[in-house]
Amino acid sequence: MGMTADLILTNGTVCPAREADSIAINGDRILAVARSDEIGALAGEGTETIDLEGRPVLPGFIDAHVHLFDAGLREIGWRVDLSGLSRDETLAALREAVKSRGEGEWVIGEGWDESRWGEPRYLTRGDLDRAFPDSPLGAVRMDGHMIVLNRVGLRAASSLVPDHGSDLFDPGKGILREEAAWTLLERIEPDPSTLAEALSGAARLCHRLGVTSVHTMTKAWR
């Protein structure tokens, strides 16, 4: 006997536009997209049916601009997710990550946003030096176009990142922008097994959000 649906959505407008108006679902899997006069074959004794009354329904989303590995590295905790945190919470989250890493191991946080803080001021090298004097550490702003480094991280970056000029590399403030920032993140990428784990984590995140196809903006990784 074939699999039956837990849930049937019927009498809707299935996007992208097609003749089908119904979707049959079992658990976290779509069984079929079909016409309402066909979908009933997948109904069982316990199937819930919802009449959409013409409302639109999308079986899956396509995200046209995704940084897939970056999301995956946050998802598995290799990068510290700083999204929505205050300045003090940001430093506390980074401090916990430093404690869990080996001596001299890079810690990268991502997602801080000074516009959400009471004092809308960027993180600086001074902030990170005072909190983290001994470990290489960087904090990527929420837009992904800038990273702030502490003194130890800046010293390491000087040998990893080509000279892009003072507009992209400001050692005084510990700031790398655009290509300088992206080059550094590529040079300190984790090992292949961690990248594979990150890719799986990113896929799970996409599935939870209903994203079924992506166009990743990430450059080629190992």
Image (cartoon, helix red, strand yellow):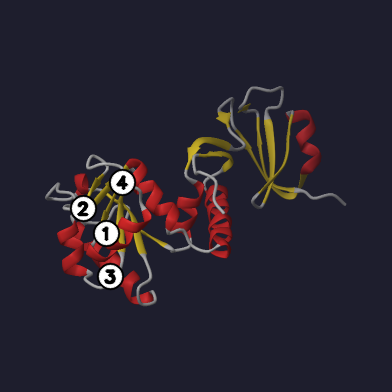
**What SS does tag 4 mark?**
loop
Between residues 35 and 46, which one lies in front from this camera angle?
35
Decide: is 51 above or below 176: above
Q: What element does badge 1 sit on?
A: helix
Q: CA distance from mark 4 to mark 2?
A: 11 Å
Percent x, y for residue 164?
31, 42
| Mark earlier in primary sequence (3, 2) | 3
- Say which of 65 and 108 sits in front: 108
Q: Amino acid at mark 2?
A: Pro
User: Do the numbered discs 1 and 2 sit on residues whose CB atoms are within 8 Å?
Assistant: yes
Side of 86 where 215 appears, left or right = right
What residue is shown with label 3?
95
Marker count (numbered): 4
Q: CA distance from mark 3 to mark 4?
A: 30 Å
Residue kind at label 3, given as amino acid type: Arg
Circles 3 and 4 in contact, beta carbons < 8 Å: no
| Residue marked by disc 1 | 154
Q: Residue at x 25, y 73 (%)?
A: 134
Mark 3, other Cα within 10 Å: few <14 / some 14–19 / many ≥20: some
User: What separation in Å lies between label 4 and label 1 (alpha carbons)?
Assistant: 13 Å
Mark 2 sits on what residue? 171
Mark closer to the chain start, 4 or 1: 1
* Disc 4 to disc 2: CB gap under 8 Å: no
Dot placed on the residue nearer the N-terminal end, 1 or 2: 1
Residue 154 lies in what quarter of the image?
bottom left
Labelled disc at residue 163: 4
Is label 4 or label 1 in front? 4
SS label for mark 3: helix
- Identified by mark 1, the residue type is Leu
